[in-house]
């Protein structure tokens, strides 16, 4: 299976300087390649592909020797990165959405570059990048599988990270528990499962969100280009980073619990991106969390030999899990009270039971059909 390993890194001032110089060259190339596409379209109504631009790289290096310093695989990756941005843009246009056109990247928005098989060497906890220098990694867990790409990231807080994308990472199968579970994600609690367990949204997140709001307000009051604005921006970035870490930690722990105890996990196939876009910060963060939670569950399930099953949403919060009758209720009603069979249950737990029942029914039906055929 594929897996990404992310580590914090430390480096000398010297290495940092050469890295930033490389990054700047990559950024210029990105913007140059974007400009070329824009002009080709405006003036000649011609679409330039990522492939066209990769082919042009050698002649570009001849014309602008400063690009020679950066490894060719790395330059190629810059062009491919732009190509991915365009592909995503066109895909969304086709779907009838209104995506933003790929943007020119400012210094603040260009933060990483990627190397493939060449140009780097890993020796224990030391990563050597040709022409740049040495990165000391904090190897919190060992790297496994075959390393396909190495990405070096400088966060806006000034912290450094290296991420390794690996193929053929060995699976770590867990022994079966004989138990299945349905999970419903909610707004009040983070999630509720069909065994009646409730996972609350972490409280520290709320506290950090408050701090973030205060710091964002303070940033918006600072004059552009001032030292105070610079400092305020740093504080906002630090808070974002802290929230992201807290959230990741919480999601990992929650997902691990489910993977450990259940063979099959049923969830509702929510189209996260289709959910109402909301300016309410806490809400948008919880939306993003569900997507991330499901992704974590998916890859952890694969690694552990468990099964994650997505069930099509089908009125799971309205139907009574006891008798199957429809009991309409608005979002503000937190308790499911069935007038037909008398079942009284937490609203989300009722939904979770419906999710697992629906999933098991669909699976039984599918395997029955497979036997007939
Ligand atoms: Zn009922």
Image: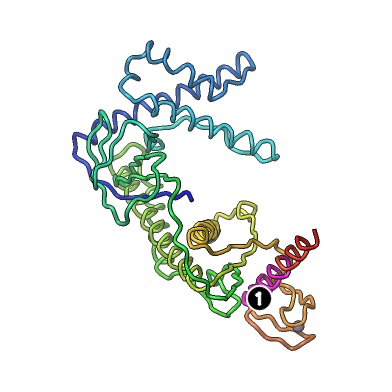
Residue stretch rendered in magenta on the structure: 347-362
Q: Decide whether the magenta segment is chiefly helix, strand or loop.
A: helix
Please determine whether, in this image, residue 149 is positioned above or below residue 236: above
Give the residue displayed 50% in from the left and 74% down from the top: 261
Give the residue displayed 41% in from the left and 53% down from the top: 217
Q: Quadrant of residue 312?
A: bottom right
User: Which percent across, then down, holds residue 76?
Assistant: 44, 26
Q: Is mark 1 within 8 Å of ligand 1?
A: no
Q: Where ligand 1 lies, by image quadrant?
A: bottom right
Residue at the extreme bottom of the image, as rendered? 342
Which residue position holds label 1?
Answer: 353
Give the residue displayed 69% in from the left and 72% down from the top: 317
Residue 155 vs residue 82: left or right?
A: left
User: Which percent across, then down, holds residue 180?
Assistant: 59, 73
Query: Which quadrant of the rendered structure holds the C terminus?
Result: bottom right
Q: Quick one: SS at disc 1?
A: helix
Residue 69 vs residue 103: left or right?
A: left
Please determine whether, in this image, residue 42 is positioned above or below residue 166: above
Residue 194 appears in the figure: yes
């Amino acid at each position: 299976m594929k897996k990404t390993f992310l580590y914090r890194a430390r480096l000398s001032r010297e290495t940092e300087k050469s890295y930033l110089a490389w990054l700047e060259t990559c950024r210029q190339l990105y913007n140059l390649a974007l400009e070329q596409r824009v002009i080709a379209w405006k003036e000649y109504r011609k679409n330039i592909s990522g492939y066209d631009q990769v082919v042009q790289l050698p002649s570009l290096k001849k014309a602008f020797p400063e690009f020679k310093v950066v490894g060719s695989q790395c330059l190629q990756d810059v062009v491919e990165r732009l190509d991915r941005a365009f592909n995503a843009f066109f895909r969304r246009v086709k779907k009838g959405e209104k995506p933003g056109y790929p943007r020119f990247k400012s210094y603040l928005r260009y933060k990483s570059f990627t190397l493939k098989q060449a140009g780097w060497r890993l020796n224990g906890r030391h990563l050597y990048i040709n022409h740049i220098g040495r990165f000391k990694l904090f190897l919190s867990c060992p790297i496994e599988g075959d390393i396909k790409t190495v990405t070096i990231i400088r966060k806006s807080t000034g912290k450094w990270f290296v991420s390794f994308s690996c193929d053929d990472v060995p699976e770590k199968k867990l022994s079966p528990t004989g138990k299945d579970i349905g999970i419903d994600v909610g707004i009040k609690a983070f999630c509720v499962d069909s065994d009646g367990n409730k996972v609350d949204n972490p409280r520290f997140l709320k506290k950090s969100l408050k701090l973030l709001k205060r710091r964002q307000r303070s940033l918006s009051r600072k004059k552009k280009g001032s030292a105070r604005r610079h400092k305020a921006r740093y504080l906002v970035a630090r808070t974002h980073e802290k929230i992201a870490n807290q959230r990741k930690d919480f999601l990992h722990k929650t997902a691990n619990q489910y993977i450990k105890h259940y063979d099959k996990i049923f969830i509702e196939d929510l189209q996260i991106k289709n959910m109402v876009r909301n300016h309410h910060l806490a809400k948008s963060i919880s939306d993003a969390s569900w997507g991330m939670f499901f992704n974590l569950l998916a890859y952890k399930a694969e690694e552990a030999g468990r099964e994650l099953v997505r069930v099509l949403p089908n009125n799971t919060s309205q139907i009574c899990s006891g008798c199957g009758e429809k009991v309409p209720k608005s979002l503000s009603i937190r308790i499911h009270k069935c007038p037909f069979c008398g079942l009284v249950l937490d609203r989300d737990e009722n939904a979770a039971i419906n999710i697992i029942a629906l999933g098991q029914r669909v699976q039984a039906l599918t395997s029955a059909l497979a036997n007939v055929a």
